[in-house]
Image (cartoon, rainbow, N blue to C red):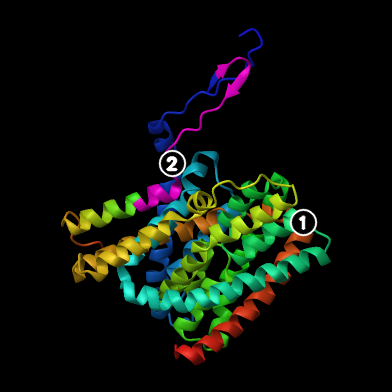
Amino acid sequence: MSQTNGEVIVTKRRGLSLDGWAVLLAFALAALVRAGVFKHIPW
Amino acid sequence: MADAVVLPQAQPVRPAVQFFKLIPGVLLLTAVGYAGKLLEQNVGKYAKAHHWTFPNIEYVLWAILIGLAISNTVGIPQIFRAGVATYEFWLKAGIVLLGSRFLLGDVLKLGGASLALVVIEIAVAIGFMTLLGRAFGLKPKLTSLLAVGSAVCGVSAIIATKGAIEADDEDSSFAIAAILALGALSLFTFPLIGHALHLTDHAYGVWSGLAVDNTAEAAAAGALYSDSAGKLAVLTKTTRNALIGFVVLAYALYWASRGQAQAIGNKASFLWQKFPKFVLGFLLISLLATFAVFNKDQIGALANLSRWAFLLTFAGVGLRTNFRELAKQGLKPFAVGAIGEVVIAAFTLGLVYGAQRIFHW
């Protein structure tokens, strides 16, 4: 947040959305499975 | 700088601190979900060993019931709340991973059939809920929020629409409460109706994906019937979610034309902003599976990771549902939502019966 001549400028922090993080986690897990780091996931 | 406005400076919260705050709640989700899984495995065995007649209750229902019991008795202590709220994150990660169980051709075939049903469902649901809201004398923006929540995808659609049409916080909390309460009821009624009507897994999965509003509840209602029905419920619901941007855009344009919301500048950018990105992740994983990037064992491992993610989601559905809080929100929006849901559920059941004849599900 910065102030100039009486105006308040609120800068929105840009980052990944919840969806974006979920997709990233899913792809990271898929890459680890593909690379053979996780060979078997029990259920 | 003499007339500079002084606002209280918010202390930035470090990402590491935010991350650690999530851990207790995520552990609670895991514990509740795993307890559900253990109960599924052991209660049946115990009942059989003691010659009791006891229905086979799936882990999904156990996890939801344990969550409901905690939330509605002792409540969720503050320390767990941030982590419990991550259940939607696990749902979305689970949906992306579930993409590995569908070949892209199947997604297009099933999604194409679902898309036609979804478009009809959205048009009828919005039309009916709008008429019902007017008949009950609800505020027009609250009616819009309830219509979007019932037609597209529950809470996410209500939140997206609230910003776009500049609705009150009170209206959106009424609409969210009505949708969540009805979602909780659908978890218990949909499987019973499905079994009573002897619906196939395919027909039931598509029906719950079409008629249950919130994605977490749609996935749970499907999984309560069978694993295969759960997969189809998620696919159909994902097709519904993919249309969220178009519906929100239409509402935003409508309210802007009446001078009660800001005009939309770049419509393509608005659509991209509202589009649920996990749908793209689901399609991409499905594409990778189609091109045999993963072998059979790896697909099995990804499917199990998806199940674990859903397990945390189902625990979260129970933990975040507090009936006392929902009851506080008032009867009128709930009555409109309930009547609308019953009509939409009956209508979509008719659609599914029709589609079953055409596509031989």
Which residue is situated farthest in the top direction here? B2
- The answer to whether residue B55 of the structure is visible from this angle is no
Label for residue B185? none
In the current view of this chain or complex, which residue is farthest to the left?
A36
Which x, y percent locates residue B171?
Answer: 72, 50
In magenta, the rendered stretch is A3-23
Position of B58 with respect to B7 (left or right) is left
For disc 2, the neighbor class at 10 Å (few under 14, some 14 to 19, many from 20) is: some
Looking at the rendered structure, the secondary structure element under dot 2 is helix
Spot occupied by residue B261 in the image (x, y as percentages of width and height): 69, 46
B58 on left or right of B103: right
Say which of B119 and B39 sits in front.
B119
Q: Are marks 1 and 2 in contact (CB under 8 Å)?
A: no
Query: Looking at the figure, which quarter contains the N terminus of chain B?
Result: top right
Point out which mark residue B140 bears: 1
Closer to the N terminus: mark 1 or mark 2? Answer: 2
Q: Is residue B163 above or below residue A6?
A: below
- Left or right of B251 on screen, residue A35: left
**Badge 2: chain ID:** B
- Which residue is located at x 15 percent, y 57 percent? A36
SS at circle 1: helix
Q: Are marks 1 and 2 on the same chain?
A: yes
